[in-house]
Amino acid sequence: MFSDVVGYTAIMGRDEGKAVKVIAHHREQLSSLLPRFNGRLIGEIGDGTLSSFHSVIDAVECAREFQSILQADPELRLRIGIHVGDVLFTNNTVLGDGVNVASRIHALAPPGGICISQRVYEEIRNKPEIRVKGLGETRLKNVTEPIRLYLLTAPNAQAAHPAQRADRATRRLLLAAVGALLLAAIIYGAVKWKEPGRPIAEQPSAGARTIRSIAVLPLDNFSGDPNQEYFADGMTDELTTDLASISALRVISRSSVMQYKGSHRPPAPEIARVLNVDGLIEGSVIRIGDRVRITAQLIDAPSDRHVWAGNFERTSRDVLALQDELAAAIAHEINVELTPQEQALLTSSHPVNPEAHEAYLRGRYFLSNPTDQNVKKALAEFERAIQLDPTFAPAYAGLSDAYAWESVGQGSFPPSIALHRAKAAAEKALQLENTLAEAHCSLGNAFVGFFDWARGESEFRQAIALKPNYAFAHDQYGVMLAWLGRFDQALTENMRAAELDPLSPEIHAGWALTLASKGDYQAAMVRARRGLDLDPTSDFAQFWVGWTEIQAGKISQAIPELEKANALGSTGYEAGFLGYAYAASGGRARAMAVIEELRRESARRFVSPLWPAIIYIGLGDRERSLDGLERAYDASEPWLAFLKMDKIYDPLRSDPRFIQLLRKVGLHK
């Protein structure tokens, strides 16, 4: 068994004496364990050891128990690979296919993990106590055919019971005819941290068909710490972001791919069908100390065929360059021609403060699920990132997005404050990094919040030019165009956003908004229902079903939908539209109860004057509704963007005060 100590070079660099003790402890533990599993030590190279066994079961159980024992020893962590194959003993050396394969598959195992080949898996697949996770096919150096690999996901936690040991002896007799040597192996030096920017074990392609659409599936966290999930998710996001800047590719967005997070994802062909892509990127992230490694493989998705694999490592300070390098390698592998601008974007990354980068990733992690509490957490993380590194532009873009979200919900302060902060943060981001597409989109949203339509459109178009696959920018631009009444252009952006993010409820809501505004209520309801089907627990998705019913004039049908949305989220806009539906259907008492509830809520936090105003529209109280709309304008309420196209405002359209308000928000043309 050739077994490699994780981080041995770093241990040696810190304390040579300690490194020698670690190696000695490794071999002492192994030597005491091997006889119990009919194993023998047949070689030592550096910090690696090579062992042989009589059966597959012996090798797997030995590896599982070895890793289980070492869980209590933070100083000694191993990676193990197991393969069945022919070998040759000559001149005190072991050669052959068994050694060649086993000595290369360890790198796909996390610290404390065990990687096995297809031939090993076939021997243990019917054992329920041994669980595995498929890693797909990969090509190995000096191995002709691709090999399918698996990761053991549940190492044995305890030593075998005596009865189990007796059963194991029986199995040895039954399996003796196999006569194969099994190797648990890790190459000495193959897992050593290489110099920054140098890929490890990068494999050539296997002649795959043309790939022009791709999805980066959530990278697995192999750091051994569940608290590092945000880091693995962040690495997934940033690789997706880099690839999204390539105009010749269609790249699926985060919210769609994150639904495949975890060990129970469907087979590659099924994912390819749902996302409508040619290729998938799978892989893992390992962070040990100051080093980050991403192992990635490219799969021809419809055929589930491995195309390419590579490992990329850098220090935490150079993690952005690591992402750029990986994205460029993928583009090269699938023969995508980069424009000069795209080449510049993928070579322009600079070192980053690791702590600031971590805080930024945590902020994005929280903002991806924007509940009231998560938005507050996101704001705190982005602020911390900026304190740690005032020159880190993405943190300002994240801060802008968090404040923009505060402005459209029922936040802690008026939209006027939130929007000014969102605008200032986006402008600072662009001052530091003018090619940051996210910051241009953030600034576009801030301008639209202030009803500066021309500058908002300019920023959205700039974001899309920099990152053609930026689904959120297409979505936000499409919504803005619908508000302006430019429906054909809006639909183009809606459909492009849905191509890039097909499983996002928010994208389908934006599409429904355009269709309903255009008067195509049946198609709008299909889109709204699709969003709700994708996430039945989302108050946002549920709200748009009710809103679409209102636009279609089906007030009574809107009420139960909006009641569900209000129960799920209880935000200002949900309560406001529910109150309007009560009022418009003759439920005056229930409408007034909602107004009273909003009044009580306003004592605790900001509640927009817009929500009582639209309820008064349903009650037929023109003066109170117009008073509320004007106060909402003074508070910079972004929802006034609906004034031109939302059917609830039809009773006010001939009123001079309403016409004047349309002029103020630039929607009178």
Image (spheres, rainbow, N blue to C red):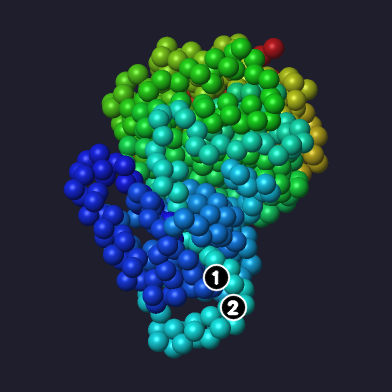
Q: Please tell me which residue lies in front, 494 or 64.
A: 64
- Quarter of the figure that contains the C terminus: top right
Viewed as shown, does residue 507 lie left or right of 284? right
Q: Distance between the residues labelled 1 and 2?
A: 8 Å
Q: Where does label 2 land, which residue?
A: 175
Residue occupying the point 37% across, 32% down: 315
Q: Name the residue under label 1.
A: 56
Residue type, label 2: Leu
Crowding at label 2, few (<14), some or many (≥20) Cα neighbours within 10 Å? Answer: some
First in sequence: mark 1 vs mark 2: 1
* Crowding near the residue tagged with mark 1, few <14, some 14–19, many ≥20 C-alpha atoms within 10 Å: many
Please determine whether, in this image, residue 249 is positioned above or below residue 104: above
* Residue 444 in view of the camera: no
Q: Do the residues labelled 1 and 2 touch (CB within 8 Å)?
A: yes
Q: What element carries label 2?
A: helix
Which residue does the image show at 43% across and 75% down from the upper left? 37
Mark 1: amino acid: Val
Q: Please state if 315 lies on the left or on the right of 598 as rendered.
A: left
